[in-house]
Each structure stands twice: as C-alpha cells, then as structure tokens.
Amino acid sequence: MGKTSELKGLYKLPPSERLSLVAKFADLTYEETEILRKSGALSLEQADKMIENVIGTFQLPLGVATNFLINNKDYLIPMVIEEPSVVAAASNAAKIARVRGGFFTESTKPVMIGQIQVTNVKNPSEAYKAILAEKDQILKIANAQDPLLIKLGGGVIDVEARPIDTRAGPMVIVHLLIDVRDAMGANVVNTMSEAVSPLIEQLTGGKVLLRIVSNLAVYRVARARAVFEKEALGGEEVVDAIIKAYAFAATDPYRCTTHNKGIMNGVIAVAMSTANDTRALESGAHAYASMGGVYKPLSEWSKTSDGDLRGEIEMPVAIGLIGGATAVHPIAKITRKILGVKTARDLGEVMAAVGLANNLAAMRALATEGIQKGHLRLHARNIAASVGAQGDMIDAVAERIIAEKKIRMDRAKEILEELRKSSKK
Ligand code: MEV
C-alpha cells in the first residue's frame, strides 16, 4: 500500500499528533519535526483555533520602515515580508517625502458591499424596482442582525439593485452597502446578506443563490499623496525618468502589473503585520485597477510646477482592526500599537501611503541604477549569513562575492573560512 493523504479524523487530533502523522507521511526527520514544533509568539493552541488541521506555525521576518510622516504625524511601519529591500525601499522613499512634508491621506467611510444573486426571476427589469421600493424594510431586517454595529454608528446605509444578463440567463443582483466600522466586515456583510434573502425572494418571486461579500470594495477607498523633491530624488532627470517609467505602466499591462505589484509589496506587508486578509486586498486592488475596462496603475505620477515629483494613489482597503485574526494574533496586537492607528480607516490610509512609498522607490531604482544592484547587495548578505557568517563577517563575505561576481553559497563558504582563518592569525 502506498501512502494515502486520506487522514480521517485528522482534524480531531491535537496539533502534536497531527504533526507525527504528517512526519510519517513525508519522512520528516526528527530535526524537521522539532522545527515545526517551535511555535513562536503565536502558540499552537491559538493557531489551532484559527484554522483547521494545524501542525505548526510559520514565521516570516517582521521589520519596521522608518521616516514615515503621514498627515504631520510620525509613524513606524511594521512590515511582514519575505522579500529583501522592501522595508529599506519604503523607509527611503518616506525619507525623501519628508522634505516636502510627508504623506497626506484621506479615506471614505468603511462601506463594504454584500452581494445577493437572485435567479429564476420572471421579469428582472420589474423585479429590481420592487427591491428598491422596499429598501426601508430590507435595511430594517439587515440592521437587526448586528445591534452593536448600529450602536457604533455602522450598519446598512443603502441598497442597490440591477438586472444583469448572464450565460445562465437573466438575474437580479442586489448590493447591500454596509458601514462595517473597524471590522474587515466580511462576516457581518455575509450575515446581513443571508438575513435579507427571504424578503428578496418574496419581492422578486425569484430564487436567491449566492449571498456573499464583494472584495471589490469601491466604497471603501483610501487615498495618499506626496511630493518628492527633485534634488532629494537625484535631480530633475530622475523626475523625468520616473514620469517615463509611469507612462510605460499607464500604457502597457505587462509593465502595469509589475508597477502595481511594487505598490502591493508595501500594502500587503502592512496587512500581514496586522494579520489582515491579504487576498481580499490584493484581489480588490487589481480589480479596482481595471474598473475602466483596461488595467491601469493604482498610482498617478506627475511633475509639479517646481519640477518636483507628485504621486497619488487611490485603492480599496478592505481591512480591519477588530475581529478575525487581527484581534487574536498576539503580534498583530503589538504591531497595531507600534502603528498607533485607532481605526480601520487610519490603517487603510497608512497602507495607501506605504504603497505609494514602495512604488516611488521601485520606479526610482528602475529608472536610475536598476533594481539588481540593491537586490544583489541584500542577496549577497543573505547568502553570507546562510553559510554561517555573523556580525561584520556578513558584509565582508558579501562584498567579496559581489566583487568576484560569484554570489553563490559554495564561494561564500570558502571566503568565510579564509576570513576566519586569517582573523585567527
Ligand atoms: C519587486 O518586488 C517589485 C518591482 O518589480 C516593482 C516595479 O517593477 O515597479 C521592483
């Protein structure tokens, strides 16, 4: 009998027993299982309550970006990311932004959309009007689901409905617009969408199928802007080169995807550090970038009359500060304190500013010395550390492998041994 992945009842076992089964399945060594057993700040008990079939936790570096001045307030930005350079790039861009007063941000109310799909509707162009005519009743039922949210000033603020034609026939789509306050909101949105569905069926004579949050949070957007002084950027030629880099992204979807990826480097790193749902943000951002029917940059770059560079960004920010993992992850509670944000709106605005910073840093590097120089330096340091170099030796080994153009483990190891021997003499 070969191995089977049908591990019945795995979910009922404690994490340590699950791990033993997985170790057996994958021939993990004792050392490997011991690594998985070390849970770090998030205990196995906590992790076991967050997702299913937990066998361990997974750690990533948590760094802080410096120099951020947002709406005249100083911020240290916690970022969780596996990629070198991103934290340094954000800090660097924020330093340049400070020269002209830092970042300025704003955001809309935290309004999420709940979608209700009504099928088997005989007359969609009449049915959707029947829904709109009963808005008050729909609002009442939905808002009764969460008295606390209403007390905090949130709740359903409007109902939209429209007929659509699909490959599976005509349908009516209802949107509940819900102010979710400081939650990411998916839970309350889904609950409310389910609760109003019987009434929607009654009003339309149709059959409700899907009732689910939309991750295209067009009513929950954050904006950030900053001016980057030309000399601090490296001169007017750099400003012009960045404008050309931006023009490339604004016209070409292959470039635009990478341009937006650079923005998401910052946004997602902050989302990770606060234990937010990064997939919701990512899918929302890219869909928002395509709203006009063509995939566009989330940011806009232009030259000021002084020859400086002006950057602006607008993006949906479906993120929360309460509920879900954001409230239980022990590190997320601390990163929130480091950030000093009080509301989900504040957090969304910070994310937009960091996204703009990372975008600027990437374009500046690309439009000047190229991205590889900085990356190589960090990569070489990583290699040096991974072969056992410590302290000053890391830079010493890194410099040698860069100079020799042999950024490889085997060469790093040899050099480290040489340096250790000569330092003992
Ligand atoms: C790498 O993670 C991000 C960049 O590719 C972004 C960009 O090209 O603008 C450098």
Image (cartoon, rainbow, N blue to C red):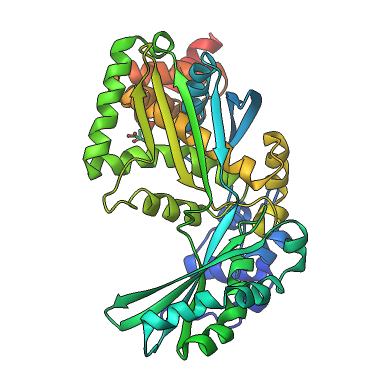
Q: Tell me which corner region of the image, top left, top right, bottom left or bottom right, holds residue 228.
A: top left
Q: Residue furthest front?
A: 133
Q: Residue at x 60, y 24 (%)?
A: 69
Residue 406 visible, this orientation: no
Q: Give the left or right position of residue 203, taking residue 412 as reference.
A: right
Viewer-closest of 9 and 347: 347
Q: Quadrant of the N terminus?
A: bottom left
Vertical side of 125 occupied by 308: above or below: above
Q: Give the left or right position of residue 317, taking residue 250 as reference.
A: right
All told, the count of numbered labels is 0
Q: Tell me which corner region of the image, top left, top right, bottom left or bottom right, holds residue 259.
A: top left
Q: Residue at x 28, y 18 (%)?
A: 240
Vertical side of 237 occupied by 200: above or below: below
Viewer-closest of 97 and 18: 97
Viewer-closest of 421 and 139: 139
Ligand 1's quadrant is: top left
**Residue 378 position within the rendered picture, expressed as x and y whole percent measured from the top left:** 43, 26
**Residue 326 position within the rendered picture, expressed as x and y whole percent measured from the top left:** 66, 53
**Residue 346 position within the rendered picture, expressed as x and y whole percent measured from the top left:** 63, 40
Residue 386 visible, this orientation: yes
Vertical side of 64 occupied by 16: above or below: below
**Residue 67 position within the rendered picture, expressed as x and y whole percent measured from the top left:** 58, 21
Q: Residue at x 36, y 14 (%)?
A: 305
